[in-house]
Image (spheres, rainbow, N blue to C red):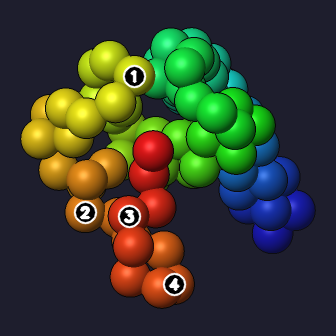
Amino acid sequence: MKLLFATVLLLFLFLSSSMFEISIAASDLCGSKCSSRCSKAGRQDRCMRFCVICCSKCHCVPSGTYGNKHECPCYKDMKNSKGKPKCP
């Protein structure tokens, strides 16, 4: 029984560490793409916050600093609680 528990625990630790590395890589990708997207925004802090949220859910960010949302339908279709576009 102890061997089974130890095996399950090691497997869990291995899988969680690999998911952690993937999330770090995704956040780096989102950070660089969102920095480019939000470079001309009037409120860059707000733009970055929402862009990173959208990027991490959709795994893409449209090119350019404005528009081009057709390149990423998930990003385009995400709405806030008021029904307005969430992603910059």
Residue that appears at 70% across and 45% down: 46
The span from disc 3 to disc 1 (Cα, nearest Å) is: 16 Å
Q: Amino acid at mark 4?
A: Ser
Q: Quadrant of the N terminus?
A: bottom right
Residue that appears at 58% across and 30% down: 41
Task: Kindly state the secondary structure of the residue where label 4 is placed.
Answer: loop
Between tags 3 and 2, which lies in front? Answer: 3
The answer to whether residue 51 is seen in the rendering is yes
Of the two numbered discs 3 and 1 on the same chain, state the one appearing first in sequence: 1
**Mark 3 Cα shell of 10 Å, populated few (<14), some (14-19), many (≥20):** few
With 45 as the anchor, is 76 left or right in this view?
left
Q: Amino acid at mark 1?
A: Thr
Where is residue 22, by image quadrant? top right
Q: Give coordinates of residue 68: x percent, y percent.
A: 19, 32
Determine whether 4 is above or below 42 in the image. Answer: below
Task: Kindly state the secondary structure of the residue where label 2 is placed.
Answer: helix
The span from disc 3 to disc 2 (Cα, nearest Å) is: 7 Å
Q: Which residue is mark 1?
A: 65
Q: Which numbered disc covers residue 81?
A: 4
Residue that appears at 50% across and 14% down: 36
**Mark 2 Cα shell of 10 Å, populated few (<14), some (14-19), many (≥20):** few
Q: Give coordinates of residue 7: x percent, y percent.
A: 73, 49
Of the two numbered discs 2 and 1 on the same chain, state the one appearing first in sequence: 1
Task: Kindly state the secondary structure of the residue where label 1 is placed.
Answer: loop
Where is residue 88, by image quadrant? top left
* Viewer-proximal residue among 78 and 1: 78
Q: Give coordinates of residue 74: x percent, y percent.
A: 25, 54
Q: Which numbered disc covers residue 85?
A: 3
